[in-house]
Image (cartoon, grey):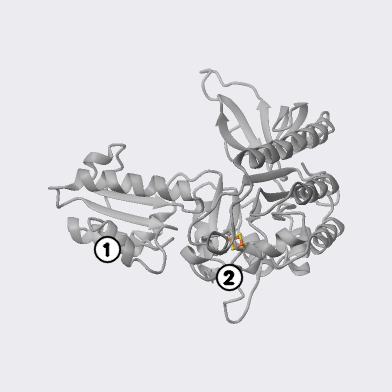
């Protein structure tokens, strides 16, 4: 629309506060910023303030009462009201501006939300209340966005959803995530497809087989189990037993050779005993996930757990349980990464991290590359967006060191032959 960005919020004509409220602390931060914005806008009628994201639920009456100076409340991905209001304020025509929502210089590895909201209602989670029921975007819309991203240099796309496996159940004629994989797979120039986050009950065999069969889909699955004890799982209303979860893991391993598995785990949920926590550790020992995203349970106002259960596990106990998980994972990841020294892999170069060239393997391992430096000594090679072959020279539990073996022009992969990290 012709606006320039500024780092100076006090002097901005348009302020858009994008919010995440999965945790109470994130919501508190957002309301704190809003409070400060309210003070700054006193006497400045021209400034437009928009709030978007998860904080804006279907019911906005209370938000409007608390923050009357906010001009636009926009739900996640609801860009139009922001553009329209900004256009009216400043005499600009927003027509055609939405296509520009794809950044001009996106990261080579970028994300596309494909389904918003969630129908699962886990007792600890605020998402279904704030983001509403599952709402799948049309496949045409998603493919169009992906094509635009690829035209702007994106090589890897992660398809996002709170429950990505349920994509398409609300679309007629019905399609699923496997169908969408196939459509996105057709885009020339795109090298990798990832997806997040899965739910064990919705990860169908059809989806698992599509991961195996489509070369661009990385053979990597993030499958949260959240707790290793059946009573805890029932209290969380996850909808499966730990036996069913482990059966799903076995099925995935059986169908997809060299699959990389990661997971999410909550420690210290209401009433979790030491024995029940040990059940979670048993699952970690049995599966040896490549990565575990561990959260200490914290009460989230508005959830079923907040209303009906007691957050009774002491903070120190939650912390100790998280440390136990982290220490175990450090050993597992260190051991498994050590085995990779001397092997070769394809890495999609993403850019510089701590001054060094880095990229990711198909299994999402962070890999640093020792590469030649160009003549001006500032721009290391290889460049972001290139897929190169490297040999692993050293390892730690969190990342791998490598040397460049060769630049590669194609990332097409025969999944039967190429080991995955
Ligand atoms: S499936 Fe995920 S997003 Fe949905 S309610 Fe459960 S934890 Fe929340």
Left/right placement of residue 267 relative to residue 244 reads: left
Seen at 53% across and 63% down, the residue is: 307
Q: Secondary structure at mark 2?
A: loop
Q: Picture quarter containing residue 353?
A: top right
Left/right placement of residue 413 relative to residue 257 reads: left
Q: Is mark 2 within 8 Å of ligand 1?
A: yes
Asked if one can make out residue 120 in the rendered structure from this viewpoint, the answer is yes
- Position of the C terminus, as image quadrant, is top right
Q: Secondary structure at mark 1?
A: helix
The answer to which of 324 and 371 lies nearer the viewer is: 324
Q: CA distance from mark 1 to mark 2?
A: 31 Å
Q: Picture quarter containing residue 296?
A: top right
Label 2 neighbour load within 10 Å: few <14, some 14-19, many 20+: some
Q: Which residue is mark 2?
A: 119
Q: Is mark 1 within 8 Å of ligand 1?
A: no
Percent across and percent down for residue 181 are 66, 63
Farthest-out residue, left? 43
Seen at 75% across and 46% down, the residue is: 274
Seen at 32% across and 67% down, the residue is: 61
- Marks 1 and 2, the one that precedes in the sequence: 1
Image quarter for ligand 1 equals bottom right
Residue 84: give its label: 1
């Amino acid at each position: 629309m012709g606006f320039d960005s500024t780092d100076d919020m006090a002097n901005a004509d348009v302020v858009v506060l994008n919010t995440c409220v999965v945790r109470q602390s994130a919501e508190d931060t957002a309301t704190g910023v809003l409070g400060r914005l309210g003070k700054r806008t006193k006497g400045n009628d021209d400034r437009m303030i928009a709030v978007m994201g998860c904080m804006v639920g279907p019911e906005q009456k209370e938000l409007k009462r608390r923050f009357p100076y906010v001009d636009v409340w926009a739900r996640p991905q609801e860009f139009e009201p922001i553009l329209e209001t900004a256009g009216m304020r400043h005499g600009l025509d927003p027509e055609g501006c939405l296509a520009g929502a794809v950044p001009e210089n996106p990261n080579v590895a970028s994300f596309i939300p494909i389904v918003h909201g969630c129908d699962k209602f886990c007792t600890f989670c605020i998402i279904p209340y704030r983001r509403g029921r599952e709402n799948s975007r049309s496949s045409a819309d998603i493919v169009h966005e992906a094509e635009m991203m690829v035209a702007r240099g994106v090589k890897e796309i992660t398809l996002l959803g709170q429950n990505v496996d349920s994509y398409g159940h609300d679309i007629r004629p019905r399609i699923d995530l496997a169908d969408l994989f196939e459509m996105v797979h057709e885009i020339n120039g795109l090298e990798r497809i990832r997806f997040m986050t899965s739910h064990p009950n919705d990860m169908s065999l059809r989806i698992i087989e599509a991961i195996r069969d489509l070369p661009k889909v990385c053979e990597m699955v993030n499958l949260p189990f959240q707790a290793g004890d059946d009573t805890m799982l029932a209290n969380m209303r996850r909808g499966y037993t730990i036996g069913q979860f482990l059966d799903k893991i076995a099925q995935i391993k059986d169908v997809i050779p060299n699959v990389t598995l990661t997971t999410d785990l909550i420690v210290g949920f209401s009433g979790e005993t030491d024995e029940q926590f040990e059940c979670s550790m048993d699952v970690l020992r049995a599966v040896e996930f490549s990565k575990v995203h561990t959260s200490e349970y914290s009460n989230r106002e508005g959830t079923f757990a907040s209303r009906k259960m007691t957050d009774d596990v002491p903070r120190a106990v939650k912390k100790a349980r998280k440390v136990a998980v982290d220490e175990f994972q450090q050993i597992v990841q260190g051991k498994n990464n050590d085995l990779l020294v001397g092997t070769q892999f394809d890495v999609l170069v993403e850019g510089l991290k701590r001054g060094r060239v880095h990229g990711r393997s198909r299994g999402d391992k962070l890999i640093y590359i020792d590469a030649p430096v160009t003549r001006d000594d500032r721009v290391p090679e290889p460049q972001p967006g290139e897929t190169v072959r490297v040999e692993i020279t050293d390892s730690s539990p969190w990342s791998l060191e490598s040397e460049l073996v060769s630049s590669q022009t194609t990332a097409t992969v025969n999944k039967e032959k190429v080991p995955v990290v």
